Image (cartoon, rainbow, N blue to C red):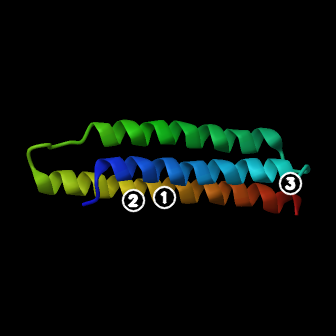
Amino acid sequence: MASVKNLKKDIDLIMSLVISDCFLVLEENSKVDNEKILDIVRDVIIKHREFKIRVNHPDGKDNPKMVKQYYKKIVEDLLSEADKALEKLSAEVKKVA
């Protein structure tokens, strides 16, 4: 398993990439609904905080297998949430294209 420190950095990186994509769309495409894009950004920020809290408080600290599964689930959820946010962003862009 990778370190918790690296997992936190990965969370920061992935979520910041999603947010930067949102702001890039806002900057480059004046036809999109700004409020909907900003709602996506708000959701990403909330999820970012939730992931950081989850990383800092693992379940079953005494059982290494449970801890490994716990962090694996966090990674799966992280990628899933980032994908959902990017799909929402893509849908908003497609509405005006």
Q: Residue at x 74, y 47 (%)?
A: 23
Say which of 95 and 50 sits in front.
50
Question: Where residue 22 appears, x then y in whole percent?
Answer: 71, 50
Q: CA distance from mark 1 to mark 3?
A: 26 Å
Q: What is the three-letter code of the residue carrying label 3? A: Glu
Up the image or down, 53 lies above or below 66; here it is above
Q: Residue at x 30, y 48 (%)?
A: 4
Tell me the SS state at disc 3: helix
Camera-nearest label, 2 or 3: 3
Q: Residue at x 77, y 52 (%)?
A: 24
| Left or right of 17 in this view: 54 | left
Question: Where residue 2 appears, x then y in whole percent?
Answer: 29, 59
Q: CA distance from mark 2 to mark 1?
A: 6 Å
Rate crowding at label 3 as few (under 14), some (14 to 19) or many (20 or more) other CA atoms within 10 Å.
few
Identify the residue at the far right of this view: 31
Tell whether label 1 touches label 2 (CB within 8 Å): yes
Residue denoted by label 1: 80
> Which badge, 1 or 3, comes first in the chain's sequence?
3
Q: CA distance from mark 2 to mark 3?
A: 31 Å
Residue denoted by label 3: 28
The numbered dot on residue 76 is: 2
Q: What is the three-letter code of the residue carrying label 1? A: Ser
Tell me the SS state at disc 2: helix
Tell whether label 3 touches label 2 (CB within 8 Å): no
